[in-house]
């Protein structure tokens, strides 16, 4: 009973991937990952953000078995990726960053090949349904080399899903694809999430992470700077701007208001006030009272929130 | 054992053969036919018998071995190098398959292709010269063992090669001379004594000699030496591949 309670109280009771103190140094001496630990929960969508060379792809490669890693550093579904690679890998589908598919094979055969490779018996009905879901059914007998870049990317997703994985890694899935296809992919990810698939994606498009992720992880120089619920992150680290439009232009901010974080626009028609989203008191009411006392007349008020991109840029800069 | 994965790799590789039928099967057969026309029919008819065997018939095992060795190495090396070149090798490396299953799939397909080519060449030879096989079962076993062991060697080559130049380097600069100097077209008894001794360091001599023994019951070296040489070569190749997958050499780094 006590054991059960301990398990229930564990913050990562539903961890499907557990990474502990993972360090990866390549033969040329470059340290791609530095003592990185991460728990990924079942059914979530985790977006990994980071600049080029941050270690995102190395991290994915280590989990998927593309890199040799020490024993007992990564478990997938409770299985160690080194000791019990059969069970751990069978849970994972991977869509790598580069478009890499056998050019001379047909779409259907390529997808069926991957299914077999992952130890699943042939299932034409499932493969056809998958191709229909990804709008590839009409191209099923086309050779891969005849497809557009976007279609090839879909084939790679179909291959990754061919063995019905519980975890899907998408390494920059929408890099270089048009807006329509990007939206389509977001829909695919949303559908996968509904079916209980855990999705881990790396992306350069912050808006993508903002749109679809439950949690955000930020990696820089091989270190995981943070991993947090998207909404919490934006609330904790984000800031809000209050823009006050004036009826008449102001020449300068009076010294009596200097204790507020105020800036004046070049034309003197707007005052900008930055405040903490997570702070108990925003100071807006006091500011407005003091502005009125200083004889400022307002025409309009607007608030705006800082984006994930700004948070990301600030974190990585630090 | 992940049988579905073995079947998937095997079928995928065999499909490549049928997609490139001209390059895979017809091309080596035509080359061998030309050898038979030149060495078997044109020159062979003017040559003396070797070990009491007509020259045209004598070169059949050598020609089969010449093609089978080259095809085994090139099929297997290309089979693993091409996915490495394209980047599609990530699929195999991230799949729940052991290196033994990967080898059975890739090497099995490469060996099957070269075995089929070997049999086609044998059948083609019967159109040009009189071919009698004294020990057909042993001949098939030796052919299969050669196909498998040199496909294993080709697999290592495909993993080792960093570019297409390296991929062709070993077959062109090492394998071809070894095969030509291994007694494909002559008996090593025809060489001066010193060269006879030097030739015994050429492993291909044992392969050709073994196959020739299965055809005619006579050869340059004893059949047990040939079997030992093939067995040893196969063992060394498996040991190297095992090391490659254990360390991830040129695959997982």
Image (cartoon, rainbow, N blue to C red):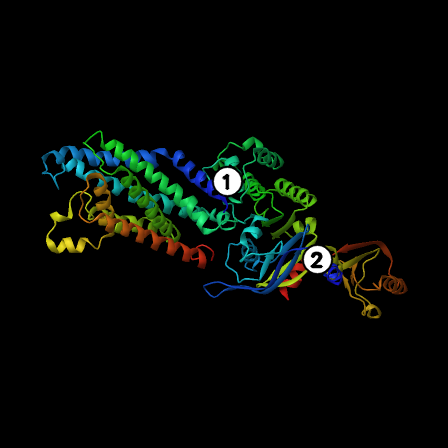
Are discs 1 and 2 both within one chain? yes
A133 and B110: which one is in front? B110
Image point (68%, 58%), residue name: A310
Determine crowd level at label 2: few under 14, some 14-19, many 20+ residues with C-alpha closer than 10 A: few
Which residue position is annotated with label 2? A13
B137 and A216: which one is in front? B137
B75 and A243: which one is in front? B75
Distance between mark 1 and mark 2 Cα atoms: 35 Å
Chain that bears disc 1: A
Determine crowd level at label 1: few under 14, some 14-19, many 20+ residues with C-alpha closer than 10 A: many
- Residue B86, image x and y in percent? 45, 46
- Residue B69, image x and y in percent? 29, 44
Q: Mark 1 or mark 2, which is nearer to you?
A: 2
Q: Is residue B184 above or below residue A227?
A: above
- Residue A111, image x and y in percent? 53, 39
Q: Report which quarter residue A287 is drawn in.
A: bottom right
- Mark drawn on residue A113: 1
């Amino acid at each position: 009973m006590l054991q059960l309670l301990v398990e229930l109280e564990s913050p990562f009771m539903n961890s499907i991937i557990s990474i502990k103190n993972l360090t990866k140094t390549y033969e040329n001496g470059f340290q791609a990952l530095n003592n990185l630990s991460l728990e990924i929960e079942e059914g979530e969508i985790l977006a990994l953000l980071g600049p080029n060379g941050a270690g995102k792809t190395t991290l994915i490669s280590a989990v998927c078995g593309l890199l040799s890693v020490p024993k007992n550093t990564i478990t997938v579904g409770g299985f160690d990726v080194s000791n019990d690679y059969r069970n751990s890998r069978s849970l994972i589908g991977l869509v790598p960053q580069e478009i890499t598919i056998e050019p001379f094979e047909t779409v259907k055969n390529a997808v069926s090949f991957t299914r077999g490779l992952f130890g699943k018996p042939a299932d034409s009905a499932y493969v056809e349904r998958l191709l229909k879901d990804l709008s590839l059914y009409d191209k099923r007998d086309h050779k891969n080399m005849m497809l557009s870049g976007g279609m090839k990317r879909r084939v790679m997703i179909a291959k990754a899903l061919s063995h019905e994985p519980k975890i899907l890694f998408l390494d920059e899935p929408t890099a270089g694809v048009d807006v329509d296809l990007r939206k389509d992919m977001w829909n695919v990810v949303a559908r996968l999430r509904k079916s209980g698939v855990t999705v881990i994606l790396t992306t350069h498009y912050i808006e993508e992470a903002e749109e679809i992720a439950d949690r955000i992880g930020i990696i820089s120089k091989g270190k995981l700077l943070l991993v947090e619920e998207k909404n919490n992150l934006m609330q904790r680290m984000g800031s809000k701007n209050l823009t006050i439009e004036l009826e008449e232009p102001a020449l300068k901010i009076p010294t009596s208001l200097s204790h507020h974080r105020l800036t004046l626009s070049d034309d003197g028609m707007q005052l900008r006030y930055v405040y903490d989203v997570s702070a108990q008191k925003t100071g807006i009411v006091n500011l407005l009272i003091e502005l009125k006392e200083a004889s400022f007349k307002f025409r309009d008020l607007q608030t705006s929130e800082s984006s994930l991109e700004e948070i990301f840029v600030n974190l990585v800069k630090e | 054992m992940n049988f579905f994965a073995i079947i998937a790799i095997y079928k995928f590789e065999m499909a490549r053969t049928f997609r490139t039928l001209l390059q895979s099967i017809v091309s080596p057969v035509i080359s061998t036919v030309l050898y038979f026309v030149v060495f078997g029919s044109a020159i062979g008819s003017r040559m003396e018998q070797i070990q009491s065997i007509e020259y045209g018939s004598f070169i059949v095992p050598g020609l089969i071995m010449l093609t089978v060795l080259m095809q085994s190495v090139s099929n297997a090396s290309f089979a693993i190098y091409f996915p490495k070149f394209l980047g599609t090798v990530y699929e195999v490396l991230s799949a729940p398959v052991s290196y033994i299953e990967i080898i059975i799939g890739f090497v099995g397909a490469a060996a099957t292709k070269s075995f089929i080519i070997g049999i086609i060449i044998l059948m083609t030879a019967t159109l040009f010269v009189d071919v009698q096989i004294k020990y057909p079962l042993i001949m098939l076993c030796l052919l299969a063992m050669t196909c498998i062991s040199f496909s294993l060697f080709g697999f290592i080559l495909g993993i080792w090669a960093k570019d297409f130049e390296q991929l062709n380097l070993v077959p062109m600069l090492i394998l071809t001379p070894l095969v030509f100097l291994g007694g494909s077209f002559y008996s090593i008894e025809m060489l001066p004594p010193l060269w006879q001794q030097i030739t015994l360091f050429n492993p291909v001599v044992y392969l050709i000699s073994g196959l020739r023994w299965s055809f005619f019951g006579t050869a340059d070296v004893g059949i047990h030496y040939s079997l030992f040489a093939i067995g040893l070569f196969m063992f060394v190749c498996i040991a190297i591949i095992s090391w490659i997958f254990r360390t991830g050499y040129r695959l997982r780094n």
